[in-house]
Image (cartoon, rainbow, N blue to C red):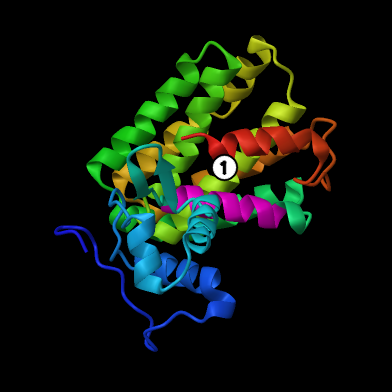
Amino acid sequence: MTKGRPAISVPRDGIVSRSRSAEQIIEVLRDQIARGELPRGSRLPSEKMLSEHFLVSAPTVREAIRALAALGLVQSRHGSGTYVTAHTDDIALSSLATAAQLEGVTATDIIRLLETLNLGSVDYVIENATADDIVRLANARDAILAGQTREEILFGVESFLRALAHAAHRPLMGVFADFLVRALVVLEIEVFPESETFWRDWTKALADLRAEIVDAVAARDADRLRAAVGSYHGQATGKLFGTEIDREMKLSDPRFAAAVTELIMRR
């Protein structure tokens, strides 16, 4: 191997089974990426070196690299090589969205699960939130009220809900929250009108509760935060289901397909 380049571990038997060669290459590289042995930003050995290492043909290596790219783990750059680009959030969001669409997850499922997640993270938020977390929450709160367009307001709402979830500093909770928040944004875009007046009025209706959430986190008051989060989700749910939205409308609904893909692919 070239000096300074991450090493690829050979399977225990030393030779990749010819009948499952591509699958085993994928398994070996995926495992090493997941464990950090091939860190984000590192360049994989060349196609020729991988072929020699795994005792397989170049087309087999290319097949494995294409599969890893489809999983969001690597990216091939013309004239430069193949690099590890794995981002936990992107991988998880794509997988969760696909699973949600396949399983027919409904609007009710998304909203209730987000509420459950946020209420369940209250104690973690109180214990782990940093000064920067509180600033992010406050900035998002202010951005919502300052927003003049649907896009600006929705960006503020998404930032606020994500900041609240990530203030718990529990990585898995954060991953699930990111997906649920983005899915909720898709629902709101679909069912609410584009009117800027509507969006300003809707967000102002929850402004006091968002302020209470920020203050409760800053005060490290778990009971106060739990009550504020519960009220926030209760009112937001009532507002959403006060429209003509079908509570059983599924994320797999054709109306959502393009929006879901766009939100998931957004960096």
Position of the N terminus by quadrant: bottom left
Residue under the point 51% across and 61% down: 64
Relative side of 221 to 149, left or right: left
Q: Looking at the picture, which amino acid does disc 1 mark?
A: Val
Relative side of 62 to 116, left or right: left
Give percent across and percent down for residue 227. Answer: 51, 49
Residue under the point 24% across and 62% down: 6
Give percent across and percent down for residue 99. Answer: 68, 57
On the question of residue 124 being in view, the answer is yes
Disc 1: which residue:
181
- Residue extending farthest to the left is 3
- The residue lying toward the viewer, choosing from 151 and 242, is 151
Residue under the point 53% across and 10% down: 148
Q: Is residue 79 above or below residue 55?
A: above
Instruction: Residue 255: say if magenta.
Output: no
Instruction: Residue 92: say if magenta.
Output: yes
Q: Secondary structure at mark 1?
A: helix
* Residue 47 occupies quadrant: bottom left
Residue under the point 70% across and 15% down: 194
Region of the chain picked out in magenta, as a range? 88-100
Relative side of 156 to 261, left or right: left
Give percent across and percent down for residue 128. Answer: 29, 55
